[in-house]
Amino acid sequence: MQDGERDFGHKVVVGANEDARQIAYRTLPGKEPTIVWLGGYRSDMRGTKAEYLLEAAEREKRAFLRLDYSGHGESGGRFEDGTISRWTEEAQAAIEAAGAKSVLLVGSSMGAWIALKLVARARFGKTGFSVSGLLLLAPAPDFTERLMRPRLSEIQLQSIATKGRLEEPSSYSAKPNIYTKALFDDGAANLVMDAPIETGCPVAIIQGMEDPDVPYDHALALMSCLSADDATLTLVKDGDHRLSRPSDLEMIARVLQSLFERVRL
């Protein structure tokens, strides 16, 4: 099938006036809870894992939604303006525009942070949908403070403070990664691992033990924050950050299916 026959493209405008940005998202109709793909930093909604999950959702006749944050993929807006708050707002807007009432959030890397922020908003009745489950892949909540800041040199920290940004070579792209002061400031204001995390739904985490970007002890620390919840952690001994090998994708599908069996509708 062509994309237009199964995976429908949409746009929603988030923000107003100079802050307005057009957010692209794609939907597959099916039964709820809707699987929502939340990609990582500089990832887009047409990546390997998102495409694989689309096919899995189609086989199971499940609803599926994926989106590009502003400054990513098919969406408008400047990447440099992006923050956790803005990207969370955009994800919520896409889900609500799609009309989903119950969602199972699949957050990859930074997308796990956004997923956890959405859970908190849903629990306080600030969204038009409920969260039935969470699947977190190489989760990187609080990465600006817990993973990045401790490894930055004084020169790099000064660059962020005085120039408003830091550029670093990327292992996944010819273009450098850009980390702005706004991203760090907003990240510090949106930490989720500094207190117990109440999700009210089952959680599954998959983490590679050879991940060079998110060490697996970060996933262990996240698990300790989820101690009161129905949470499981799967460690992949030779897994990297991408978790995109055929064996990784098959594992993600199995864990996702087991998560659906734990969902309380």
Image (spheres, helix red, strand yellow):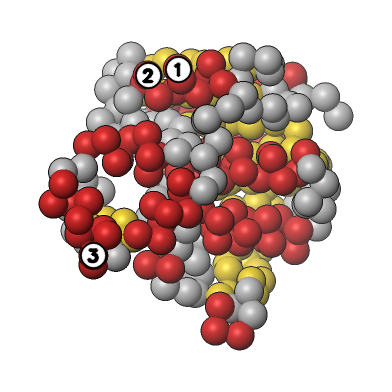
Q: Secondary structure at mark 2?
A: helix
Q: Kindly state the secondary structure of the residue where label 3 is placed.
A: helix
Q: Are marks 1 and 2 in contact (CB under 8 Å)?
A: yes
Question: In the figure, 73 relative to 30: above or below?
Answer: below
| Residue position marked by numbered label 1 in the rendering | 220
Label 1–label 3 contact, CB within 8 A: no
Residue 88: x %, y % from top left = 59, 54
Q: Which residue is mark 2?
A: 217
Three-letter amino acid code at the position of disc 1: Leu
Residue 244 visible here: no
Residue depicted at x 37% and y 67%: 80
Q: CA distance from mark 1 to mark 3?
A: 35 Å
**Label 1 vs label 2: CA separation?**
5 Å
**Is 202 above or below relative to 178?**
above
Quadrant (top left/top right/bottom left/bottom right) for the C terminus = top right
Nearer the observer, 230 or 162: 162
Residue name at image x 27 percent, y 35 percent = 150
Mark 2 residue type: Asp
Residue situated furthest right in the rendering: 265
Q: Quadrant of residue 180?
A: bottom left
Relative to 243, 62 lies left or right: right
Mark 3 vs mark 2: which is more N-terminal? 3
Q: Residues within 10 Å of mark 3 (few under 14, many from 20)?
A: few
The vertical placement of 157 against 70, above or below, is above
Residue on which disc 3 sits: 162
